[in-house]
Amino acid sequence: MRIRVDLLCLVLGLGLVSLGCDDDKKKGLAAPSAAPTAHPAPTTTSPASAAASASAAPSASAAPAKTLADRLKCKDLMPGTTPPGPLRGMKVGQPPAACPECGPTCSLIRETNPLEGVSVVYVCNEKFDRATADRKIEEVKKTLKKTAPVTEFGRGGIGGLKEAGLFYDVLVYDDDSDCSVTVSWMRGKREDVVAAAKYAIAGVKQADLK
């Protein structure tokens, strides 16, 4: 009888152990699994957005337009191969222009006598107007001594002594372009300066100013 009681206790004990294991299995199955780590969606750029970004980028700056002083070269305006008598033997140079937008400033130097230097200033950036030209001639006339009009060529001008006779200046307007030239010759004679102005103004054409 005691053996049966012991056997019954053993069976009941095994049952309880089995029930405990089943509960643990159920709990393990019911436990939620860890959620997978979320990854951010890859960023994409539509063709339209890319085009908009490209158009928003600053465009390369355009090259600045050349000034008249850059385009008109003194060696072409007054080539050393055909100068009038008083300019023969002088070397043509192109120092920085006083007004680059107006035109070049040219120099002519006699290497054997630098005191005979000549300056030629071109002004070609305004359309020729008779009234404006006459006013300019009158303004220049007031700054000169022993003045004389220049009527041998072009649209007219004026010449005279400047700075107590150290220079002789001539201003003259071209007759086939919008240019005027002012020629200043240190210790120059009127006939030589007028000849230089005629030569300088003949070298420029309206087509060169486009």
Image (cartoon, rainbow, N blue to C red):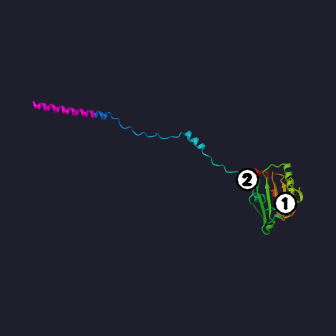
Name the residue tied to disc 2. Answer: 67
Viewer-proximal residue, 69 or 14? 14
Residue beneath the point at 85% across and 54% down: 139
Mark yes or no: residue 171 visible: yes
Tell me, yes or no, whether the highlighted magenta stretch contains residue 175.
no
Rounded to the nearest angstrom, the CA distance separating label 2 from label 1 is: 25 Å
Viewer-proximal residue, 44 or 14? 14
Q: Residues within 10 Å of mark 1 (few under 14, many from 20)?
A: many
Residues drawn in magenta = 1-24
Image location of residue 142, percent across then percent down: 87, 56
Q: What element carries label 2?
A: loop
Viewer-proximal residue, 58 or 65? 58
Q: Which amino acid does label 1 sit on?
A: Asp
Earlier-in-chain disc, 2 versus 1:
2
Q: Is residue 179 left or right of residue 3?
A: right
- Give the number of the mark in front: 2 or 1: 1
Q: Is mark 1 on a helix, strand or loop?
A: strand
Which quadrant of the view contains residue 154? bottom right
Q: Which amino acid does label 2 sit on?
A: Thr
- Magenta stretch, main secondary structure class: helix
Name the residue tied to disc 1. Answer: 169
Image location of residue 118, percent across then percent down: 80, 62
